[in-house]
Amino acid sequence: MFKKILIANRGEIALRIIRACKELGIKTVVIHSQVDGNSFATRNADESICVGADPASESYLNMANIISAAEISGADAIHPGYGFLAENSHFAEICETCGIKFIGPSKEAILSMGDKARAREIMDREGVPIIPGSKTILNKVEKAVRVAKKIGYPVILKAAAGGGGKGMRIVEDEESLRKGFVSAQNEAKKAFSKGGIYIEKYLKAPRHIEFQISADKKGNVHYFPERECSIQRKHQKLIEESPSPAVNMKLRKRMGKAAIRAAKSINYVTVGTVEFLVDENENFYFMEMNTRIQVEHPVSEEVTGVDLVKEQIRLAAGEELSPGHVEPYGHAIECRINAEDHTRDFMPSAGLITVFNLPGGPGIRVDTAVHAGYEIPAYYDSMIAKVISHGSDREEAIARMRRALNEFEIGGVSTTIPFHIEVLKNKKFLKGSFNTHFIQDEMSL
Amino acid sequence: MRFKDAEKKIKELASAMKDTDIQEIEYASGSNNILVVRMPDNKEETAAAEPGKEQARGPEESGEKKKVTVYSHSVGIYRDVVPPSRKASVRSGQKVDKGEVLGAVESMKIMKEILAPVSGRIAVKLIKNNDSVQYGQELFEIEESV
């Protein structure tokens, strides 16, 4: 087991890792930027080292200074948390070269999943369902018509060179495909000076459902009960829960096995998450794999009793998998509380937190590194707390979350608590009948 | 004693010495000892400068002489002498020229030299050979020649 772990992150996740290390009897050293010098994380670590100025590019992404910090402090492993360097294969490689264990998968595994086209190719080869579509770039409309007929309408046309939604077009039938193909080609030519088009099946109202996996170096892989993450805005998750109201035992087993295949195909070790899109007919498609611990990992911890961060550290140290937990115990929900004003297009609200009174009581957990008197720096993301509720069923978990959100007092900055309370009153949410368009359709946001 | 606690205590002691004629204070707690000594001609407090880029300087008029603090811009081990041949090993009270090598921070086997941002006299050397240093740490105070 490791003797000392350097934590290359900040905020609640840095604190979460410190807590796991303390329970495992491992010393901690946390790096920080100048503005974070007196944070709750630095105060709780055994050591702290300033690695740079406030902008993340000069501190939390400063690989040379972070590695030096590990060297001078004698850390034998680095935990990257999420964000920053967590999915940077180059950083994982530098750690390896310097003889410091990177707590995550191999650099090859990070690379395979970081390249979306390559990941899709590997999944297809391994029999993990991917969204059906053209395998090559299409230049002629007749070929597009043939592909669309095979995969079924509606389809989405995407510029091969594209990004940022440019040159994307959803078509419902052959006639609109013929018209749309030429326009999409012209748009793509204009925007990217290349007219190549891809076709993919368009999922009208998909759910975002993901599987936490854990894997040891012997090749054993477990899956955890799924997490439902459809409540999102601009691909940013806001509420996560486990299990999903839309997944039954049979589907869970099918998807869980696919997640295991995905992890095995790249010899994955430690913890990771395989994300899927699921349609109304229980068809599921691989979206991507996150090769790190995720923000929403606590909901899986609450329904299984497994400490995922401790498990991640153990697995990185070469230990074997703990027993699996395929079926959830009860139900857990997480609300990400951001310092943002949801009535003003979720505008970040940096500043001094004057009041910070945490909710509590049965089934409530709050992961935060914020406190009264804390000034939210403008340099980093705006998440200030994660409230996690656990109940014997979904109804109880929701009731507890509502109670907790009403108890939570935060003064000095705007927060997304009122937004979460609104969602938790919504009839479709309460029924569990929603998809990734929920925020747009139901909340008009 | 943790570095941060020591730093806090030093500041506290220095502040207690301000506006008095005390030249030395020694503080002892358990196995820890801190000795704060007033430097000659060091009657005014040095202005804290924002550590930033390489050897950021923070000159501010204080009486007749300007004090400039030299900060570390990297993380590593401080070395008095910079190999292969350049001598550094500066001491408190020593005169230095602008651009002169004061020492180096070794980081991932690479020596990053610390250069004097101004000509003057080393008022205080705040670091010892082989000490570990972090970004923004104060290394030297130079009393700039007028």
Image: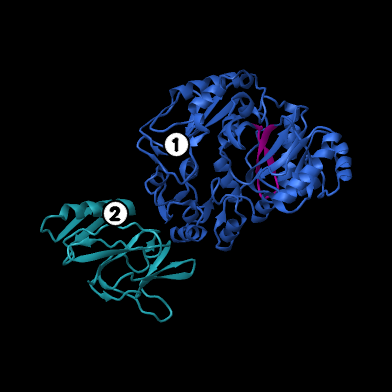
Give the mark count.
2
Task: Give x and y (percent) for residue A266.
Answer: 71, 50
- Which chain contains the residue that carries disc 1? A
SS under mark 2: helix
Pointer 2 residue = B7
Give the quarter of the figure containing the C terminus of chain A. Answer: top right
Taking depth in this image into account, of A173 and A39 the one nearest to the observer is A173
Please give the residue where the numbered disc 1 appears in the rendered image.
Answer: A349
Quarter of the image where one finds residue A435: top right
Across and down, in percent, residue B54 comes to 40, 65
Q: Residue at x 66, y 27 (%)?
A: A244
Judged from this view, the residue extending furthest toward the bottom is B85
Q: Is the magenta stretch mostly helix, strand or loop?
A: strand
- In this rendering, the answer to whether A4 lies above or below A234 is below
Left or right, B40 with reference to A43: left
Where are the magenta residues, as a range?
A: A207-227
Quarter holding residue A243? top right
Residue A403 is tagged as: none
- Name the tint of chain B in the rendering: cyan
